[in-house]
Image: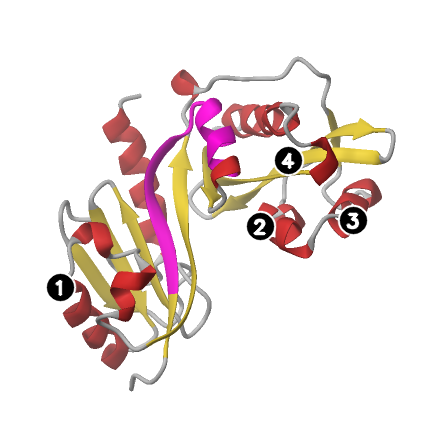
Amino acid sequence: MTDDALLHRARRRWAALAGAPVVFRDAAVEVVASPQSSLCPPGWVGIVALGGAVIATAPGGGAADTVRRALHDLPVTAATDPAALRDVLPVAGTLGPATLAYCEAAGFRPAGATAVEPVPADHADLAALLARVPAGDAGESGLAEITSPAFVLRGAAGVVAAAGYGVWPGGTAHIGVLTAPAARGRGLARAVATAAVTDALRRGLLPQWRARPEASRRVARALGFRELGAQLSVRLRSVCG
């Protein structure tokens, strides 16, 4: 698969999540009103940039007009930059940006020889790992939302690393990974993520890695994921419509 094909697959899936007809156009920003958008929380503005093209959704027509005018005056590369958006929009809050990376079978680089155990997503041992790590780490991992099995590694204190994925509309496997703080730096994240990505590819899904921390991005790159863009959600202070 060529890089262009991988980019096309990623764009097609995000456009389908917009909840209204929209397409990625190279070097352009496309903004639509979509109260049902899955690009962001309800009532927010969702912005996704992939390969030098941007789509954005707003909760209503007035907000869409405001966002369209604001993004028209920005370089495409600044569309997911919170600081740049605060200069042109009444921003009340942001989520992200998070880097979006994707992997196809030909570019996948499996890692980790340690045996990884699959367990049900609702297994008590996975819940115990989520409960004993910092809340921010648990939330960032996305493991509470996986629909696949959880692929885990165990230590003396129980599960010390886990990965899995949630299946999004259009066949995207949204990867989640978590390692207990005391067990980091030993390649465990790569090992459990390898198992999750292998399972997703076997099922014909497109693995997606969405991350903000650089440590998580390094794991993705080590496995062959290619960073193609970013996602940002924006809450506006006061826009009619």
Marks 2 and 3 sit apart, C-alpha to C-alpha, by 14 Å
The magenta segment is: 216-233
Q: Nearer the viewer, residue 183 or 64?
A: 183
Tag in front: 1 or 3 = 3
At a point 18% along the width and 64% down the height, the residue shown is 71
Question: What residue does disc 4 label?
Answer: 163
Q: Earlier in the sequence, mark 4 or mark 2?
A: 2
Q: Position of residue 215 (x, y in %)?
A: 52, 36
- Contact between marks 4 and 2 (CB within 8 A): the answer is no
Q: Residue at x 18, y 69 (%)?
A: 70
User: Label 2 neighbourhood size at 10 Å, few (<14), some (14-19), many (20+)?
Assistant: some
In primary-sequence order, the first of circles 1 and 3 is: 1
Q: CA distance from mark 3 to mark 4?
A: 16 Å
Q: Nearer the viewer, residue 167 or 136?
A: 136
Residue position marked by numbered label 3 in the rendering: 132
Residue 38, image x, y percentages: 42, 60
Q: How far across and how far down the image is residue 105, in percent?
A: 43, 20
